[in-house]
Image (cartoon, grey):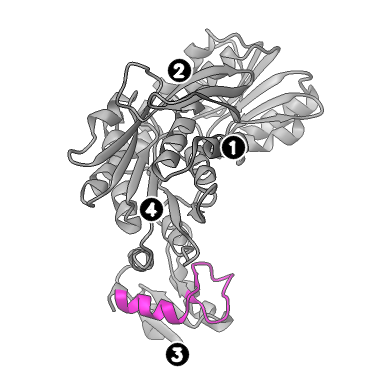
Amino acid sequence: MDSKDLYAIYQQHPVITTDSRECPEGSIFIALKGESFDGNQFAAQALDKGCAVAIVDDEQVYNNYTGDKQMILVADTLQTYKDMAREHRRRFDIPVIGITGTNGKTTTKELVRAVLAERYDEMATEGNFNNDVGVPKTLFRLSVMHEIAVIEMGASHPGDIKTLAETAEPTCGLITNVGKAHLQGFGSLEGVIRTKGELYDNLATRPGSVIFVNADNEYLMGILPQGVKTECYTRDENKQDARVYGQIIACDPFLRLRWRENDGDWHEVKTHLIGSYNIDNVLAAATVGLHFGITPEQICHAIENYTPSNNRSQLTDTEHNHLIVDAYNANPTSMAAALDNFSLMEVSPKMAILGEMRELGDSSREEHMRVVEKLKACPFDEVWLVGKEFQDIECPYRKFDDVEQVKAAITESRPEGHYILIKGSNGTRLFQLPELL
């Protein structure tokens, strides 16, 4: 069967599950494979639990099935899932905005979503469903009620964005930035730039597409394709051709800024975002909003009412301390930005609990040494470093093997009255610390 035939089956059974523990009556089970599981082994069980159809790519499982429900054999279930999702997406003639980037893509996606919701019935990526399983899952949420969609796209290897863009077929695109992340998969910063640029490559094949771009980012400006409409945002008042221009007013600790469209009136915004670097994310959302007819007043209202979640630059006051929690992810670029921002905050005493940065490959030791060197110039009263990558780097800071050791140290002598930055890769599990602090 080709994707159109399989999609016809979906139209008869319009619920898809990839988890054999959740099998709604009459649904379609797609047997995906992961590092530690093979959905093919649970296909028959899914049918017994209520699924009407199971799609597998294991010929032996297919041949051994003796039940009376429909089992379909395909060459690759993941590719089939993506192909069916693309068929579903094509049923909706609406703008689809693809967003990727090394840092800030989730915050930008949420800001864009909030801005668009001022006028449209929007649909956007939930949580971290931004990979080759999450993007199809998101696309299948599209319904006739939706007028616009915002799709986040993550990548850890070359070709990832190409595949996701081919699935989502965006009409507009935004790359927040490019930086040193997942170097183990990309090999180099140049590899990161090429992979993120695959979104631009896809848009260049689609007539009428639009790229929203930070005019201050030389990497992104350098890979813009010819012949595609671009709308720029900037912090440089000398860039007269940008649609949106913005300036930071203060970070005390929340970001306050003002922005204007071309030579229009200034609009001041008080955000709930921690970090001066978030101005680029706000300006991106404003640019997208203006393109889709959102008024400046509506844009300001949406941004002022957006509150971050999911351990991304959250400021949390506990009984004992003030926490800046950014423990969802970390790479050299985002770590440097977080340290710079925390250094500029006029508060005291300051404490930083930093987890190691994962997936940096051969560059890992060098990048962790750079963090330590940067810390030496930061006005912090106390620093705790967590993870094996920090262990053999000579420095005056307290070191811990893992989060469990940190928990024990907090229990023994909890900091009181501190402003504490918690930053690290998700795998270090520093997100467990706020409840103890």
Local crowd size for mark 1, using a 10 Å CA cut-off: few (<14), some (14–19), many (≥20): some
The location of residue 379, given as percent across then percent down, is 60, 8
Whichever of callouts 3 and 1 sits on the residue coming sooner in the sequence is 3
Local crowd size for mark 3, using a 10 Å CA cut-off: few (<14), some (14–19), many (≥20): few
Measured Cα–Cα span from mark 2 to mark 3: 59 Å
Measured Cα–Cα span from mark 3 to mark 4: 42 Å
**Secondary element type, mark 4:** strand
> In the picture, which quadrant includes the N terminus?
bottom left
**Secondary element type, mark 3:** loop
Reading the image, the residue beneath label 4 is 96
Measured Cα–Cα span from mark 2 to mark 1: 42 Å
Whichever of callouts 4 and 2 sits on the residue coming sooner in the sequence is 4
The range drawn in magenta is: 4-28
Local crowd size for mark 4, using a 10 Å CA cut-off: few (<14), some (14–19), many (≥20): many
Which residue: 23% across, 33% down? 223
In the image, which disc is placed on residue 66? 3
Reading the image, the residue beneath label 1 is 301
In the image, which disc is placed on residue 37? none
Whichever of callouts 3 and 4 sits on the residue coming sooner in the sequence is 3
- Residue type at mark 4 is Val
User: Which residue extends farthest front?
Assistant: 264
Reading the image, the residue beneath label 2 is 369
Mark 1 or 4: in front is 1
Mark 3 or 1: in front is 1
Mark 2 or 1: in front is 1
**Secondary element type, mark 1:** helix
Residue 366 lies in the magenta-colored region: no
The location of residue 101, given as percent across then percent down, is 39, 37
From the viewer's side, name the closer residue of 199 and 332: 199
Cβ atoms at labels 3 and 1 below 8 Å apart: no
The location of residue 29, given as percent across then percent down, is 47, 74
